[in-house]
Image (tube, rainbow, N blue to C red):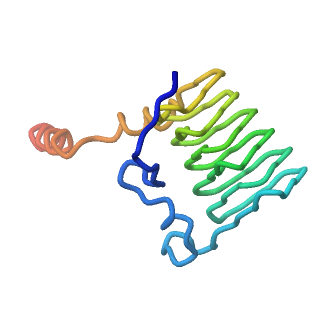
Amino acid sequence: MAIFSSNKSKDKREGVDLSSQFSANNEENVHGVSTISMETTITGTIESNSVFKMEGVLNGDINGNKLVHVGKTGKVNGNITAETVVIDGEVSGEVAADKVEIGNTGKVYATITSAVFVIQEGGLFEGTKKIKVALIKEKETKPKAFDKEKLEKKENKEL
């Protein structure tokens, strides 16, 4: 049995338009956008301070700074490290990021370490998920405005 839908998939996730993130004109992309096109195979380690999009094949690691996107035709046999990783292609290895999202065409066979983890309907994940605790603890230890006022009142009473 097959399921068909007339809705066309858009590259929008949680209100964020990926096409704007992959634009050299985006203010956050001061270092530009690096793209490895399909039908390109690379062996080795890629290090990038720009937004990075992989549509080809990589046998090696990606050390990204901001956003790494493995597109529908992209395949990575190695590790990925970045602030945000979006996977619409295939990844085998380890992924470490603040946020990891597997799209509806994504296939991930990996150990994922992240604070935020999203799998869209149709996405495939086989592996191990670890929570990135450092980010969660940092958010919990920051005093809230209410707590800060309470603390200041308490200190003034002690003086």
Counting every numbered tag in the picture gives 0
Q: Position of residue 105 (x, y in %)?
A: 58, 39
Q: Position of residue 134 (x, y in %)?
A: 51, 34
Residue that extends furthest to the bottom in the rendered view of this protein:
25
Q: Position of residue 30 (x, y in %)?
A: 58, 75
Question: Residue at (78%, 54%) from the top-left corner?
Answer: 56
In the image: residue 147, left or right of residue 57:
left
Query: Nearest the camera: 11 or 77?
Result: 11
Instruction: Determine whether 73 is above or below 158 in the image.
Output: below
Instruction: Determine whether 92 is above or below 63 in the image.
Output: above
Question: Residue at (41%, 45%) from the top-left corner?
Answer: 6
Query: Nearest the camera: 2 or 47?
Result: 2
**Position of the C terminus by quadrant:** top left
Instruction: Determine whether 31 is above or below 39 in the image.
Output: below
Question: Residue at (55%, 71%) from the top-left corner?
Answer: 23
Q: Position of residue 8 (x, y in %)?
A: 44, 50
Residue 127: name its quadrant.
Answer: top right
Query: Nearest the camera: 75 or 111?
Result: 75
In the image: residue 144, left or right of residue 1:
left
Residue that extends furthest to the right in the rendered view of this protein:
43
Question: Residue at (43%, 34%) from the top-left corner?
Answer: 136
In the image: residue 9, left or right of residue 32:
left
Residue that extends furthest to the front in the rendered view of this protein:
1
In the image: residue 147, left or right of residue 26:
left
Query: Nearest the camera: 65 or 33?
Result: 33
